[in-house]
Amino acid sequence: MDLLAEFWEQCTGFLSNLWSQFLSLAASFSISSMLDVLLISFIIFSVIKFVRETRAEQLVKGIFLLLGVWLVSNVLQLRMMQNILNYFFNFSVIALIIVFQPEIRRALEQMGRSSNIGKNLGLLSSKEEEALEKQKRLCIEAVADAANNLQRTKTGALMVFERQTRLGDIIDTGTVVNAIPSPPIIGNIFFNKAPLHDGAMIIRDGMVYAAGCILPLTKSDNVSIDLGTRHRAAIGMSENSDAVVVVVSEETGQISIACNGVLTRNYTRDTLKSALEGFLLTEEPEKPQRRIPSLRRGKKNE
């Protein structure tokens, strides 16, 4: 009974001390403290979301495993293992930056994007904005018509709509065209005997800016094995930038859109036009909700 009473007394003392500390913190809590907590919570949430949505999840699991080994080596006094892990963790920040470089770059690019940046800074007049939007609408119309024609003839095509992320390094791999978009122009670019038909066409501010460009392939392991190089390049481009990529399959004639690393398929001329208007003309583009796998094995250049 004496031991039980002593244990109860210690528990109540601990709870009382904890409650008094809580009241002390609550009394000193201010608006700045609340803002600080909210910011830290947002950062933690963003980091968790970033880790879960990228290949960083597997790397983080490996880091936690190393931390567990480090704790065990400390407990068991494994000096050699301690020294090795201490050297590793001393350079861990640099190592993490190198390993996560693609994900960090993408996250920073997403933070820097703003669909209204030109308007907010007053860089474009209302007339210039109206002219730019009109040109974009005409371009979307031309791309939808061209994709419909390419679908009928089963001609492969890869059309990239540049948005906030500039694609200068991609444009440098191709040939600058800088032409007003039209179905004949687009059809000529992707004609299978034309010199630029194998590469991608870059559309900037409603103009066919470059053609024959080389795109990065996706490194994701979740892409269907039925998808060929053309579709993998579209997904890879959308993973490395905020671009919207339209793909026409050479084997099936099927029209697809890649955006934010997600490929959606089975578009018609009208649904393609509607989707592109949603991505390129509205303030908050609607993201594809699911990845639709290919039903057939594509060619290597699909």
Image (cartoon, rainbow, N blue to C red):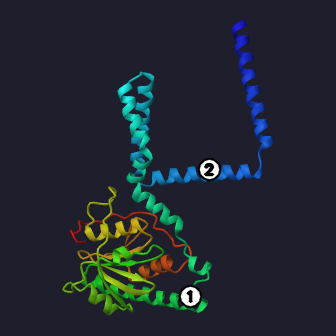
Residues 281 and 67: in front is: 67
Mark positioned earlier in the residue sequence (2 or 1): 2
Question: How dense is the environment of label 1, judged by Cα within 10 Å: few (below 14), some, or many (20 and up)?
Answer: some
| One can see residue 179 in this view | yes
Q: Which residue is mark 2?
A: 40
Classify mark 1: helix, strand or loop.
Answer: helix
Q: Which residue is mark 1?
A: 129
Disc 2 to disc 1, C-alpha distance: 38 Å
Residues 215 and 133: in front is: 215
Q: Is residue 246 left or right of residue 302?
A: right
Label pair 2/1, CB-CB below 8 angstroms: no
The amino acid pointed to by label 2 is: Ile
Q: Is residue 75 left or right of residue 300?
A: right
Residue 67: percent from left, percent from top: 44, 35
Disc number placed over residue 242 in the picture, else none: none
Residue 243: percent from left, percent from top: 42, 73
- Residue 32 position (above or below residue 71): below
